[in-house]
Image: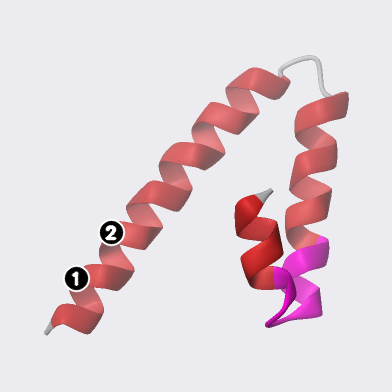
Amino acid sequence: MLLMFAIGGINLVWMLALGAIMAVERLSQRGEGVAQFLGVVIIIASVLLVLAYAR
């Protein structure tokens, strides 16, 4: 939710995408697995962005 709040002020498309992801997490029978997978993906993407900008 914090990520959605931060992104929502920047770009409406990203906010809609994150809302759709949250809906899938809540409505899917495997929602917890989806949430864990997406959490790992977001952490890896964050680390890669930090490393890219650190150069």
Name the main secondary structure of what is drawn in magenta.
Answer: helix
Q: Is residue 10 left or right of residue 22?
A: left
Color style of the picture: secondary structure
Residue matched to label 2: 47
Establish if 39 lies above or below 15: above
Residue 39, position as x, y percentages in the image: 50, 39
In the image, residue 2 lies at what x, y percent?
A: 63, 53
Q: Residue at x 80, y 77 (%)?
A: 12
Asked if the residue at tag 1 contacts the one at tag 2, i.e. Cβ–Cβ closer than 8 Å, the answer is yes
Q: Position of residue 55 (x, y in %)?
A: 11, 85
| CA distance for labels 2 and 1 | 6 Å
Give the magenta range.
8-16
Reply yes or no: does residue 23 show up in magenta.
Answer: no
Which residue lies under the disc numbered 1? Answer: 51
Q: Label 1 amino acid?
A: Leu
Residue at left offset 77%, top offset 66%: 15
At 81% from the left and 53% from the top, the residue drawn is 19
Find the residue positioned furthest to the left: 55
